[in-house]
Structures are given as structure tokens and as C-alpha cells.
Image (cartoon, helix red, strand yellow):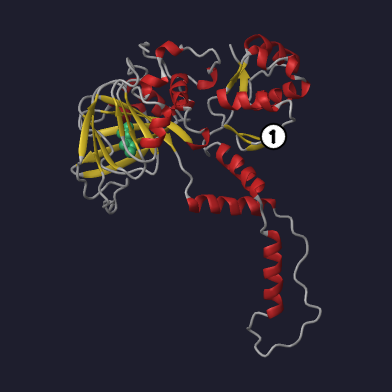
Amino acid sequence: MNKPLIKPAHASRNQPDKPFTDADYSLQTLLGGMSVEKFLADHWHKKPLLIRQALPGFGNWLNRESLTELACQDNSEGRLVQFKRGKCLLEYGPFDPETLRTLPKRDWSLLVSGVNHLLPEADWLLHRFDFIPAARLDDLMVSFAPPGGGVGPHFDSYDVFLIQGQGRRRWEISTQDDLTVVDGAPLRILQNFRVDESWELDPGDMLYLPPQLAHNGVALTDCMTWSVGFRAPKAEEIVGQFLTYLQDKLELPGMYSDPDLKQQKHVAEIPAAMLDWAEKTIKAAARWNKSDIADFLGRYLSEPKPHVYFDPPYRPKSLTAFTKAVQKTGLALDARSQMLFRGEAFFLNGERVEASTVMQPTLKTLADKRFLLPGECGQEQGQEMLALLYLWYQAGFLFPAG
Ligand code: SIN
Ligand code: CO
């Protein structure tokens, strides 16, 4: 894990034979010797867990300079939080390098979300948490803060694993119920934060926090935190989005007609016949079953975030050349690709794919592992499979490895 500082690179070079070996990491170490089963039963979504040296030797993949470079890129999602005279200030990237070079010595934090799309190492790290369903995964955020820096006491609606990179940070948590936030602040900072417990984290230490738990991370030295976040869809959001999905699928011919209209006593009264017709029509249209919900969820959860774009290959290979390449080296999903499945339905980046029974095992492997080995994506998988993979290659969703 002790790798030299790397230059930010696009994660599209994600490879099946990843540049890290399993010797760099073990799931057992990551969870401090606890089984996944026990972690899920006792901690996940319930209570915090501190794991000392979850990633021994971790810490130098990014530093202030390279995170600054990322935060200045057009395709990054950066935020700068500063505390000046007790006031919280928030700015959004992309930033001008000069702004980030000339910051005070203390009390600010630079945060870049979606680093897993920008840095292959971050993508690799994110997928060490594959013991949690991909449908829950959000992204990996990296922050840098000088002494005193942080985003203030707050709570998140996410489950998060906070991994200490370079430097030291003190994490304070509170089980308080009072979640009142400071009025008018650009971030939701807690008005009254009462520390119940605190820990100082060194490089490689990791703190898991469940959602809604008040916390505060304060940098003790120049420090970097890598946050692997897991989203949970909000009830209001899922219903709202499902209604939009239903609306997009609507094809309803016809309209209200009233050939038997009789004069009403009140001209302003809505006719009873119109009310009956609307009720009948809406009830008939607003019908769905579990497979409609699965179709909606697959599309919705695999939909890339609004700022994410795919780059089709600059000079696309022919189908024959693509086939040869993947037979030799295998293929990998682009780090930005989100692939899920439910039963026989496969979803990639918001689109549904109908897969024949013979294709399903290979597609499940691709969705789970995010790569296919040479023997898993060649002629033996059939022309239909190759044609589908080639289509995704042309869209920039995957690429031959190597
Ligand atoms: C960070 O400062 O890196 C993490 C902020 C948080 O607590 O969510
Ligand atoms: Co937080």
C-alpha cells in the first residue's frame, strides 16, 4: 500500500488485473478482524465502530497539492469550507489554483467528491467495500484540512467509512437528539454539539458512522480524510421519481367527452360525470406491479449523476479488433459506470438490457466484479454477447483492459 504519490489520472484505465494485489489489503484487516456478518449485525446503520489500522500503510495516494489539482479540474466536484470569525463560508469548485494556494494556515477544508471517478486507486478503495450492495454505494470523497480545519459539527443521512489518510484528525461523536442547525449557515452545522466520545485517528485508521449520528472531525495536523459514503434513497425522492417514471411511460389515448350533457344548477360546479371519468381513468392508468418497480429502481439507481458524462473511444476499434482485444486482455467497466441487476433484468447507466439466459451469468459477473477475464468475454460467449459488449464499448461504458 505504500505507493508513491500519484498524479491524478482518469480512472478509465481501471484494469481487471488491478495495480494492487490482495496482499495490500484484506477484508479481515479492514474490519479489524470482525466478520462481515458481525459488522452488519452489530454496527451497520446502527452504531459507530473505530478500526485501528484498517488499512495499514495507507495515506500517501493524495496530498494537498494533488487534491488541489483535482479540485481545479472542470470535471470535479469540489467544495471549500472556511471558518472566519466564527462564520462559515462555502464555495464550490472548480477552483482557480491561486485561490487554493493562498488560503490561511488554519480552519478550512477542501473536499472533493467522486474521487473514485478521477483516480483509479480511489475506485479500487471504494470497491473494497463491496460487502455492501452496490445499490447503496454513493461515492468516495477526499478532503484536506490544515490544523483546526473541518466542516463543523453536523450529521449526515449517509452511512460512511472515514479513513484517515495523511496526518491526524480528532473525531468527536454525540448521540444527542437535538439536531437543530445554525440558522442561515451555508452548511447544516449543529447549533449545540455535546461531545460524548472522541478518538484521534492516524493514517490507516478508519471510523464507521451510521446516518443521523452527530459528529465533528477536526484536523490536528495537515490531514486528509477519505470518506466512502453509502446513500439510502429517501421515501419522498423514491415516490416522486417513480411518479415521473410512470408519467414518462404513459400512453393514454382519448379524452373526456360529454355527449349527454345536461344543464347544471351551478355553472361553477365540477360536473359529477367529469369527476367519475377522471377517477376511472387515473385508477386504470396508475397501476403497477413489482416488476415495474424493479425496472424503475434499476434504471433510477444506475443512472449516473447529472455531471457525469461518458467519453466514447476517440478512435473506436472495429468489432473484430475489439473482440481480439478483449479475448487477449479481458475488459473492465469504466469507473463511472453503474451496473446493477435484479432477476433477469440488467441495468447499466440508467438503461435496461434484455439478456438471454445464456448471457446472464457473464453479465452477473461483470456487474459484480466490474471486469471480465479474457476467457469470460470471447467468442465462446457468443455473438450476441460480443455485440452487446461492443455497443457498451462504443458508448464509453467499458473498454478492453490493458
Ligand atoms: C471530511 O471532513 O473529510 C468529512 C466530513 C464529514 O464529516 O462528513
Ligand atoms: Co459527516
Residue 323 appears in the picture as rendered: yes
Crowdedness near tag 1: few (<14), some (14–19) or many (≥20) residues, C-alpha within 10 Å: few
User: Viewed as shown, does residue 243 lie left or right of 236?
Assistant: right
Check disc 1 and report its element: helix, strand or loop.
strand
Q: Amino acid at mark 1?
A: Val
From the viewer's perspective, is residue 288 above or below residue 65? below
x, y percent for residue 297: 59, 43
Q: From the viewer's perspective, is residue 217 above or below residue 17?
A: below
- Give the quadrant of the C terminus: top right
Q: Is residue 339 left or right of residue 44?
A: right
Residue position for label 1: 353
- Quadrant of the rendered image containing residue 243: bottom right
One can see residue 43 in this view: no
User: Which of the 4 image quarters holds residue 80?
Assistant: top left
Q: Residue furthest top?
A: 328
How many numbered marks appear? Answer: 1
Q: Is residue 241 above or below residue 132?
A: below
Residue 303: % across, % down: 57, 38
Image quarter for ligand 2: top left
At 45% from the left and 32% from the top, the residue drawn is 139
Considering every residue shown, the one lying at the far bottom of the view is: 265
The spot of residue 271 in percent (x, y) is 68, 80
Q: Nearer the viewer, residue 72 or 271?
A: 271
**Residue 279 pos. (x, y %):** 67, 69
Q: Quadrant of residue 275?
A: bottom right
Q: Give the residue displayed 25% in from the left and 48% down from the top.
A: 176
